[in-house]
Image (spheres, helix red, strand yellow):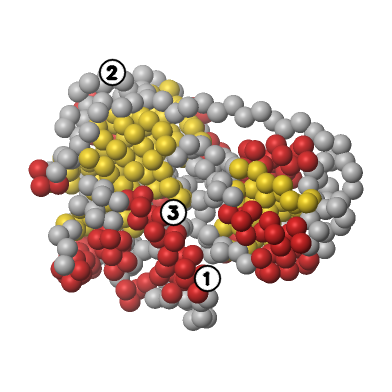
């Protein structure tokens, strides 16, 4: 009898596929999470693996690479990767990692069975079981316990607000032209969100402030597209041995976080390699979606963007900040189809459930920083690019009862006048919804003092 191993976090695959696979003569086993899945595969030697892509501790790309590395054990193994993502780049990355097929959720049993038949799986032959590698995961802990003067009161500051590419010039003076970088100071910690070109000026400011004293900070990377990491080689604190810099992010499609960050600093792209940096640099793959940075609690969630992208919710003593830099709402993506093809009820229902998960994640946030790159007209020609429409972002913020929304990831072709028009339209939408949501556009140099009540906070221009 042929054996299939189902790997996901919530056993959704088992719920959809257990019965039809069993009826088709398959012996079905399942594993919760990628690490357990690889271990089960080495022990059980299945003929087929069906694996979810977005798993927190060990994703589908990693599962594919781990199994393909065991060529003597899995010479005839077939792998199907499933995902909520419909981006072609994610499909190509899965195939490059070793998958034989890529299916977009929600899954239909008939579609899966058809793909299985097309893979022409041979009958399973007896093989010797192996022993899976032991996982050794270290908990995420704080790095700045003694900084009692940092983050009192908790503050947020924008250093880079632009998406895709930096756009300096007279048309971007008001809102800024640097790519994504946001600083949060709270409860003794300095937390930096992304390392776009804005992190260069943040580094200069920190050097002037600390005047040779050690700087301890944590950098949270949402994803490794270049506009979110390109500023790190120019981050001056990384070049001083007394500083402690901790970088946390999710593993990419083809290489780990260390490899991706290091590659942009290799010759001939940059004169100083990451290995030559004298600071106390610690790079960690994001494994647990609930962790602590000192006294600050952080939760993470997957976003809908090409590649693997995560958003963060930072829980501070002054309130919560949600950072969702690159995201395309599922419902709009599936409703306004680029190819104008009709969408099934199942697909639309599934999309709504995915958006509902995101709304639950941001529910009641004091501050929401969210990808709002396009207006409604622009979005219709950018469907499937992985970015949000301001109309949808306002609706999501209203439904989630957010207190203040910052439009973020400004399009490189949007000048100050265009962004101001989008803010005005967003505020009009709030009035149409009959809500009290505060809306502004993220602007470089703006500092927000966090408070439990949004009415107690204020903005300053640096």
The residue sitting at 50% across, 58% down in the picture is: 306
Judge whether residue 50 can be spotted in this image. Answer: yes
Q: Which residue is mark 3?
A: 303
Label placed on residue 203: none
Label placed on residue 346: 1
Closer to us: mark 2 or mark 3?
A: 3
Q: Give the farthest residue toward the right.
A: 125
Residue 154 position within the rendered picture, expressed as x and y whole percent measured from the top left: 20, 34
The residue sitting at 88% across, 55% down in the picture is: 123
The quadrant of the image that shows the C terminus is: top left
Quarter-of-image position of residue 146: top left
Q: CA distance from mark 2 to mark 1?
A: 52 Å
Label placed on residue 146: 2
Q: Is residue 69 above or below residue 151?
A: below
Q: Is residue 206 above or below residue 224?
A: above
Residue 363 position within the rendered picture, expressed as x and y whole percent measured from the top left: 30, 51
Q: Earlier in the sequence, mark 3 or mark 1?
A: 3
Residue 186 position within the rendered picture, expressed as x and y whole percent measured from the top left: 24, 32
Kindly indicate whether the residue at mark 1 contacts the one at mark 2 (C-beta within 8 angstroms).
no
């Amino acid at each position: 009898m042929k054996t299939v191993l189902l790997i996901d976090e919530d056993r959704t695959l088992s719920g959809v596929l257990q019965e039809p696979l069993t009826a088709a003569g398959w012996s079905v086993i399942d594993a919760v999470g990628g690490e357990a899945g690889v271990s089960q595969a080495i022990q059980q030697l299945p003929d087929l693996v069906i694996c979810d892509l977005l798993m927190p501790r060990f994703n589908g790309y990693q599962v594919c690479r781990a199994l393909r590395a065991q060529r003597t054990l899995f010479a005839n193994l077939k792998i199907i990767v499933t995902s909520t993502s419909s981006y072609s780049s994610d499909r190509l990355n899965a195939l490059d990692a070793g998958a034989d097929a890529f299916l977009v959720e929600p899954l239909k049993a008939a579609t899966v069975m058809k793909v299985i038949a097309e893979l022409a799986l041979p009958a399973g032959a007896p093989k010797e079981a192996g022993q899976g590698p032991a996982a050794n995961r270290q908990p995420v802990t704080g790095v700045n316990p003694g900084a009692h003067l940092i983050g009192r009161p908790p503050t947020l500051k924008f250093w880079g607000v632009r998406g895709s590419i930096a756009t300096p010039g007279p048309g971007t003076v008001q809102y800024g032209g640097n790519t994504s970088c946001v600083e949060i100071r709270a409860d003794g910690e300095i937390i930096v969100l992304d390392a776009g070109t804005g992190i260069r000026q943040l580094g200069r400011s920190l050097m002037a402030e600390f005047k040779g004293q050690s700087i301890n900070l944590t950098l949270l990377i949402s994803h490794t597209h270049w506009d979110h990491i390109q500023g790190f080689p120019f981050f001056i604190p990384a070049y001083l041995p007394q500083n402690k810099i901790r970088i946390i992010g999710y593993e990419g499609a083809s290489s780990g976080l260390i490899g991706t960050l290091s590659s942009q600093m290799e010759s001939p792209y940059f004169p100083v390699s990451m290995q030559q940096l004298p600071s106390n640099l610690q790079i960690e793959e994001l494994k647990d979606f609930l962790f602590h940075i000192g006294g600050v609690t952080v939760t993470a969630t997957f976003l809908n963007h090409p590649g693997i992208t995560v958003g963060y919710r930072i829980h501070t003593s002054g309130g919560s900040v949600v950072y969702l830099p690159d995201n395309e709402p599922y419902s709009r993506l599936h409703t306004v189809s680029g190819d104008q093809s009709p969408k099934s009820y199942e697909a639309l229902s599934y999309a709504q459930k995915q958006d509902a998960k995101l709304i639950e994640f941001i529910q009641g946030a004091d501050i929401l920083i969210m990808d709002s790159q396009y207006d409604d007209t622009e979005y219709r020609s950018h469907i499937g690019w992985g970015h949000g429409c301001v109309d949808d972002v306002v609706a999501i913020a209203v439904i989630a009862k957010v207190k203040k929304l910052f439009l973020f990831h400004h399009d490189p072709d949007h000048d100050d006048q265009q962004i101001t028009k989008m803010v005005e339209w967003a505020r009009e939408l709030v009035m149409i919804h009959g809500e009290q949501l505060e809306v502004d556009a993220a602007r470089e140099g703006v500092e927000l003092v966090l408070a439990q009540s949004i009415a107690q906070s204020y903005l300053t221009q640096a």
